[in-house]
């Protein structure tokens, strides 16, 4: 029954492909990295055990594995736009650190009062303290500790997207590991009007404080589904009536020649390897952005932005045409 929503095959339309189917610490004791401990915490007792562990909102300063960095910084957001968006959408905040100059700023004051009434602890701190909390990041005078991001179920994301518009657009990321790229994709997708994002659970960046910072508040109104198997998720999207288009740097139809009408999923490949072969087999068509310079490929977030713009440009052009006809008459 779900396949009834799909458009019939026509010349120029792609044909369907066939559907396809943290290391443990040694000796059972956790290891502590030096960058996880303050000066007092580095002191070792006579028994050889560290005196205390690091608080939850500290982040490692050394380069560590993505799993460790995500688990450590997932509950901290910083910067004026991300924190302001969280306050405006009444996100559950455990604590807010803010410099005195911003505390009584008209943009923050009433929202902070409301958050405080709901149980949020609001601390006025000096910029140096904020730099310690955010590990030297560009905090812009404010930071907040929030509950971990709540992902949507894929079925709920599909249902919400179809209720929002009759031609929904969803982004799928195939192994994006750089949180800055993921945050930029989220910001662009939400700003241009896409209905959601699908990311894999393994070997890919999740929603961390860095992603929230780069997304600049877009996550407060943008839905993300995290799936165990991306190929299976794409097949589920197909069954729901979506056409799957994968971006490729060297093969595929030119982006501006593809018809992006109807329900669309744009799949963006990883920074180094692009789309995996399994993901390519799940796509109805591969599309590429024509490049005439010597640079062989684009940044993943830039490619996503260009594919999104072309998708919506085709839809906007018809809307503008109708508006112009109305003015002429």
Image (cartoon, rainbow, N blue to C red):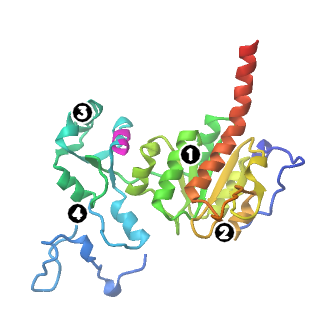
Residue 86 visible to the viewer: yes
Q: Position of residue 27 (x, y in %)?
A: 32, 87
Name which of mark 1 and mark 2 comes first in the sequence. 1
Q: Is residue 186 above or below residue 66?
A: above
Task: Determine which residue is flagged by label 1.
Answer: 189
- Label 2 or label 4, whichever lies nearer to me, is 2
Q: Is residue 159 left or right of residue 77?
A: right
Task: Determine which residue is flagged by label 2.
Answer: 276
By secondary structure, the bulk of the magenta-drawn segment is best described as: helix
How far apart in space, not on screen, are marks 3 and 2 (Cα)?
A: 48 Å
Q: Residue furthest front?
A: 293
Please tell me which residue lies in front, 13 or 304. 304
Question: Which dot marks residue 55?
Answer: 4
Question: Which dot marks residue 105?
Answer: 3
Name which of mark 4 and mark 1 comes first in the sequence. 4
- Label 4 or label 1, whichever lies nearer to me, is 1
């Amino acid at each position: 029954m779900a396949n009834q929503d799909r458009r019939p095959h026509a010349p120029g339309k792609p044909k369907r492909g066939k559907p396809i189917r943290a290391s443990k610490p040694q000796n059972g004791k956790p290891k502590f990295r030096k960058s996880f401990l303050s000066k007092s915490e580095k002191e070792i007792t006579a028994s050889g055990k560290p005196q205390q562990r690091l608080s939850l909102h500290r982040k490692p300063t050394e380069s560590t594995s993505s799993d460790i960095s995500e688990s450590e910084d997932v509950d901290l957001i910083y910067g004026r736009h991300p924190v302001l968006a969280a306050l405006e959408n009444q996100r559950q905040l455990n604590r807010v650190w803010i410099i005195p100059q911003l505390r009584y700023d008209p943009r923050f004051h009433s929202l902070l009062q409301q958050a405080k009434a709901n149980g949020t602890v609001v601390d006025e701190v000096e910029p140096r303290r904020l730099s310690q909390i955010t590990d030297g990041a560009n905090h812009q005078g404010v930071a907040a500790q929030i509950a971990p991001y709540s992902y949507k179920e894929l079925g709920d994301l599909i249902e919400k997207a179809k209720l929002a518009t009759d031609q929904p657009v969803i982004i799928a990321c195939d192994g994006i590991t750089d949180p800055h790229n993921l945050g930029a994709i989220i910001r662009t997708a939400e700003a241009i009007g896409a209905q959601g994002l699908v990311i894999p659970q393994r070997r890919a960046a999740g929603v961390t404080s860095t992603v929230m910072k780069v997304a600049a508040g877009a996550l407060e109104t943008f839905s993300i589904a995290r799936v165990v198997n991306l190929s299976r998720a794409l097949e589920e999207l197909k069954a729901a009536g979506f056409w799957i288009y994968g971006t490729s740097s060297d093969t595929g139809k030119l982006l501006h020649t593809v018809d992006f009408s109807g329900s669309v999923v744009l799949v963006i490949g990883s920074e180094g390897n692009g789309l995996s072969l399994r993901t390519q087999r799940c796509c109805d068509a591969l599309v590429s952005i024509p490049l005439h310079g010597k640079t062989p490929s684009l940044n993943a977030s830039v490619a996503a932005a260009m594919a999104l713009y072309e998708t919506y440009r085709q839809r906007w052009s018809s809307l503008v045409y109708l508006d112009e006809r109305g003015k002429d008459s």
